[in-house]
Amino acid sequence: MSGGKLDASRAALLVVDVQEAFRKAVPGFDDLSRASAALVQGAEAVGIPIVVTEQYPKGLGRTVADVARHLPDDVKPIEKVSFSASRADGFDLGGRDQVLVCGIEAHVCVNQTVLDLLEDGLEVHVAQDAVGSRFERDRQEMQSQIVSGLDVTDRGAGNQIGRGASRPSGSRRRRVKKPPRRSLDGWKSGRNAPMVRATGRG
């Protein structure tokens, strides 16, 4: 599958485990939850399917209110015990082949989800301003696993999928050696933090 910009007709939003128990444990949690909520609102506005997961909610609590209150009535969080959201019972992207991912924790559930989605041949976009871990080094480790050896740019995800959106701001591009069969871009979203895109096939 060739890489491309986010397309409302192809994309789905996946919110991974933005749960109450992480509020005090994850640095910048409030910013992360607001960024996730903004993605949910944007996805609903342009008709992008939304999938939400919760890791062992009996112990970690439910999706935080900041995000949950913006979910469409027909979107119910999927409970899971596996780290990878894509391996949870009931996980379904409705045939979409692009996935915009946000959530917690970056180096565990988000990372394993991204790797499994790529393995399934999907195009994966990660909102870096809407992912987090208890320790910054773990978030950076996840980012480096995806970014290392790939192209990086800044752009607005909303500008790619939103019809009638404002013109994207100027981008900066850092070009490094590409590995075979993968490409990656980054975009600015919401609070001007970068996003990344990885594709399973070049």
Image (cartoon, rainbow, N blue to C red):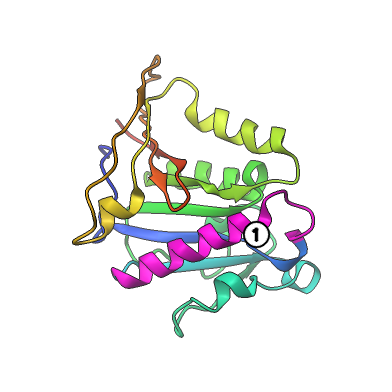
Query: Seen in the image, is 131 located left or right of residue 127?
Result: right
Query: To which residue does mark 1 refer?
Result: 30
In terms of secondary structure, what is the magenta stretch mainly? helix
96 vs 134: above or below: below
Q: Position of residue 137 (x, y in %)?
A: 71, 32
What element does badge 1 sit on? helix
Q: Position of residue 82 (x, y in %)?
A: 67, 57
Question: Which residues, given as a range, are shown in magenta?
Answer: 22-46
142 vs 101: above or below: above
Residue 64 appearing in the image: yes
Residue 91 appearing in the image: no
Q: How many marks?
A: 1
The residue drawn where x is 51% and y is 45% is 114
**Residue 34 among magenta residues:** yes
Q: Position of residue 51 (x, y in %)?
A: 47, 67
The residue drawn where x is 46% and y is 47% is 117
129 vs 154: above or below: below
**Residue 173 among magenta residues:** no
Amino acid beneath label 1: Asp
Picture quarter with the C terminus: top left
140 vs 100: above or below: above
